[in-house]
Amino acid sequence: MFQQNQDIFKVLLDAVSEGVVIVDEHQKIVETNDSANQMFGYAKGELVKQSLNILIPQNYHAGHGAHFNGFMKHKARRQMGHGRDLFGAKKDGSVFPVEAGLNPFTIYGKDYVMALVIDISERKYMEQERNHLANIFKESLNEIYVFDAKTLKYINANYGAQKNIGYSLEELTDMTPIDLNPNFTESQFRMQLNELNDKAIEKIQFETIHQRKSGSTYPVNVYLQLSKLGDRAVFVAIILDITEQKNYTEKLEKTVELRTEELKTALATEMELNDLKTKFLSMVSHEFKTPLSGILTSTMLLNKYKLTEQQEKREKHINTITDKVQYLNTILNDFLSVEKLEKGKINYKFTSFKLSKVLNEVIYNANMILKKGQHINYPEHIDDISLFQDEKILELSLSNILYNAIKYSPENTVIDITISQNKNTTIINVTDNGMGIPEKDQKNIFNRYFRAENALLMQGTGIGLNIVKDHLVNLNGTISFESVEHQGSTFTIELPNKAAI
């Protein structure tokens, strides 16, 4: 009869979906069910007589004994894993998050503890995913609104939206997009939404004006798409403030016009002038259109991947958007730098600094864009090298040369950086094993907007090296190079150790 009861108990134990681990007062395992064995990766009976520590990660061993003794002293049921992270250790050494309920009991005068263990890996992963997406929504500098598909009333708005529009979330929940958009009536706006409601298209985009709480207005690009919030149909609106873009476009147009006038004076014939102008405008259009198309495509596709297993695809498009925005920002900064240099509006800031500090920052950023198998050799013995110069200009110059070395070199190549300093000057060499510069193009390599023939199909504006050279000349420095096509290039920066103020 006793054996029969034991068999029934064992069957019931194995029928429990949670992992069950029973230990005695000495923390020795006396029984486990099939769920626990599978959860921790052990065969049936393999855990019996083992110390409970075998199921606890090594870094938790030190404090576990005291916790267990305290629990045995009070002998009260306890739920573990709520409010703090609790982990189990598998046979293969991997660690996973768990929740455990502890239940003390006594049989034949001996004390035992039965632990009901639940693997919460999937739950934790889902929580992390939700937190990650929530942070993207919350921290985005763009305005993001969610509003009801029927009433059009706002349900949520991120910090970027509240900051730019001037209304709090509480105020916005009593408002609709019509309240922010002086160009639309409700009927006009609903007409815009009809194609989304009918699912004829997945998103709509248009340019309009937003009005802040203060009454001021600003131009925006609006991207709208239909979504679900539980069982509730909602619209998600991503609003891009294009004030700077509008201002910059006007500025760029004026700059292009000014450059065109200068070219008329410099070029010998009208045909040469038109040819150069066409190439410049085509380059500007291409360098802006390509990344913007990538950003729009990734933004459209991002909403399609809603399942947990599609996170890799989501991250791919988020990384694409980040890369394209960074590239556009670089182009804009280059154009602005050109204008400031031409007008003599650069105010250099001279400080004393360690060269290694600048180099570490440049290499750290460069490592993020290395191609597969590429490697940067860090120079030796530079910890004692200091300069009194404009730190930011040196960082810009090194970044430009190093990024070019990465861009124009194939995978699995090495980029060498060497540095030397004498009494008066510091010399920095960056050597790659890339495509090199054709001999016939080398005389023009520092000319603005010029690009070597073998690099025309790659992204670039032909501005970077020109900016670097102008800055270095202003600082009484030089930049030079040696290059052989198909073998590589070495760019050399020579800069005075102490700037002349």
Image: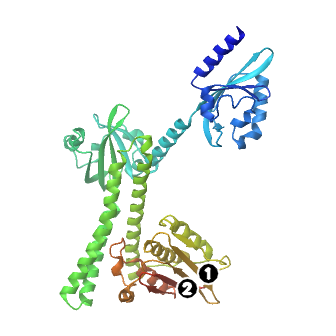
Query: CA separation, marks 1 and 2?
Result: 9 Å
Amino acid under label 1? Leu
The location of residue 139, given as percent across then percent down, is 46, 50
Residue at point 21%, 38% (across, down): 198
Please determine whether, in this image, residue 238 is positioned above or below residue 34. Answer: below
| Labels 1 & 2 near each other (Cβ < 8 A) | yes
Residue at point 64%, 42% (across, down): 92
Residue nearer the viewer, 330 or 23: 23
Q: Is residue 10 left or right of residue 429?
A: right
Tell me if mark 1 has few (under 14), some (14-19) or many (20+) residues whose alpha carbon lies within 10 angstroms of its own.
many
Q: Which residue is mark 1?
A: 387
Which residue is situated farthest in the bottom direction here?
Answer: 268
Amino acid under label 2? Leu
Please determine whether, in this image, residue 316 is positioned above or below residue 334. Answer: above
Element under disc 2: strand
**Quadrant housing the N terminus:** top right
Q: Is residue 167 visible?
A: yes
Residue at point 39%, 87% (across, down): 442
Residue nearer the viewer, 431 or 302: 431
Q: Which residue is mark 2?
A: 495
The location of residue 55, given as percent across then percent down, is 69, 36
Please determine whether, in this image, residue 146 is positioned above or below residue 215. Answer: above
Dividing the picture into quadrants, the one containing residue 185 is top left
